[in-house]
Image (cartoon, rainbow, N blue to C red):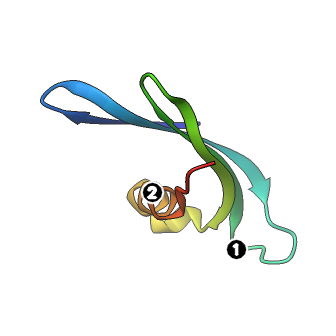
Amino acid sequence: MLTVEIKINGMVVGMIYSANKGKNFEKEEFNNYKFEYWRPGEGVISRGTLLHKPEDGVEVLAQSILHAVRPL
């Protein structure tokens, strides 16, 4: 599980929650990840799934999730 806090001046303004759901059977070099993006006072504002190569690193995963965030 991946959790990322986004803060401005020490105040949390957003959080990413993501979980690895295992290998993708069509593209075996990728794993499936489920994610939610949350804001204080608003709750979950976006959720989805994406593919990620684990060897690309956690920073690339977090960046991909932020690019995928779309309001519900």
Camera-nearest residue between 51 and 22: 51
- Left or right: 34 as drawn, with respect to 54: right
Instruction: Report the residue that reaches farthest toward the bottom.
Output: 27
Q: Position of residue 19 (x, y in %)?
A: 65, 42
**Is 29 rendered above or below residue 61?**
below
Q: CA distance from mark 2 to mark 1?
A: 22 Å
Say which mark, if any, is on residue 66. 2
Question: Counting residues from the N terminus, which is met first, the one under dot 2 or under dot 1?
Answer: 1
Residue 57 visible in the shown view: yes
Where is residue 33? Give x, y as percent.
Answer: 67, 53
Q: Residues within 10 Å of mark 2 (few under 14, many from 20)?
A: some
- Residue bearing the label numbered 1: 29
Give the mark toward the camera: 2 or 1. 2
Q: Nearer the viewer, residue 15 or 23?
A: 15
Residue 12, placed above or below residue 31: above
Identify the residue shown where x is 46% and y is 64%: 67
Res 4 seen here: no
Q: Residue at coordinates 32% horizontally, 33% vertically from top-left?
A: 13
Callout 1, which amino acid? Glu
SS type, badge 1: loop
Three-letter amino acid code at the position of disc 2: Leu
5 relative to 51 in the view: left or right:
left
Q: Residue furthest left?
A: 9
In the displayed structure, does residue 2 sit left or right of residue 22?
A: left
Residue at 49 percent of width and 58 percent of height: 61
Tell me which residue sits at (52%, 56%) in the image. Answer: 69
Asked which secondary structure carries label 2, the reply is helix
Question: Which quadrant of the view contains residue 28?
Answer: bottom right
